[in-house]
Image (cartoon, grey):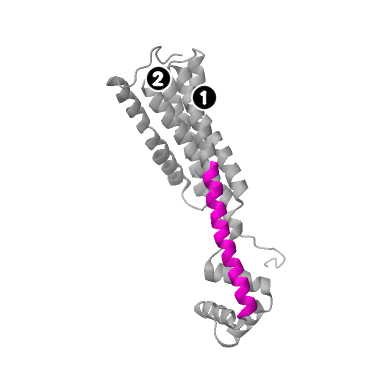
Amino acid sequence: MDDQSTTHVEPHVKESSRIRDLVFGFGDGVNTSLGIIAGVGGAAVAADIVILAALVGMFTGAKAMAVQNYLAVKSQREVLESEIKREEFEIENVPEKERQEIEEIYMAKGFRGDDLTRVVNKITSDKDVWLKTMLTEELGLNLEILGSPIKSALIMFGAFLLGGIIPIVPYFAVKGGIMPPSIAIGIAIGMSLTSSFIVGAIKSRMAKKSWVRGGIEMAVLGTGIALVGYGIGSELNNVGIVHVQGGASG
């Protein structure tokens, strides 16, 4: 006998601006720092210079990404808010036209006759429900998903710094004479690949997609592209365009 009192709860994951900002901020932070470390380290310069360049790039990049994210989200919210005001105006001033649009929306979903009339009457009897239905069904808008400009900027800034510091850590060991630069760059690459894989896997798991594929995609595409910097730095050093005395040992 089935337990009628048992409530079936099906888990769902909503698209979130926080997840978006965390993933992009962290990924960009890792790739930016690793690209600088690989490029400057490839030129065989002192560990102090590598660390300085990476820290400057990390904080500069974090600030730039935060500002860009703030402006982007703010602009998007302003556009969406203007659409909301327009819908509110139309509901108040041309209700019959808006009611017709509700009918068309639910006719497209297969409602007809009395069922359609009941649904439309129910929705249009509450202006808040009516507005929300117009925003989601007609325009596909959702301010909650978009997020707050300030929160998005702060999350982006923090995530960028968190990801950015990871490739830099091994070079502090180089500076302290604990390991050579060749080992440090290998560890930095390994740490960056691992952390990028984990974030990509978590993101894909939350989206109900293959966590293995998501992890590999973020690790390879992001971190792999950043390593182009190593070849550039090494080549500049080999041809003599860049030459710093003192080696890479710090």
Q: Residue at x 51, y 27 (%)?
A: 55
- The magenta segment is 66-94
Picture quadrant of residue 132: bottom right
Q: Quadrant of the N terminus?
A: bottom right
Q: Amino acid at mark 2?
A: Ser
For disc 1, the neighbor class at 10 Å (few under 14, some 14 to 19, many from 20) is some
Furthest toward the bottom, the residue is 113
Q: Does residue 212 sit above or below 144 in this rendering?
A: above
Picture quadrant of residue 86: bottom right
Residue 177 is labelled as none
- Give how far across and how far down residue 77 sits, in percent: 57, 57
Q: Residue at x 48, y 17 (%)?
A: 174
Dot 2 corresponds to which residue? 182
Q: Is residue 62 left or right of residue 131?
A: left
- The answer, for residue 13, to whether it is visible in the render is no
Q: Is residue 240 left or right of residue 149?
A: left
Dot 1 corresponds to which residue? 169
Q: Amino acid at mark 1?
A: Val
In three-dimensional space, the C-alpha distance between marks 2 and 1, rounded to whole angstroms, equals 14 Å
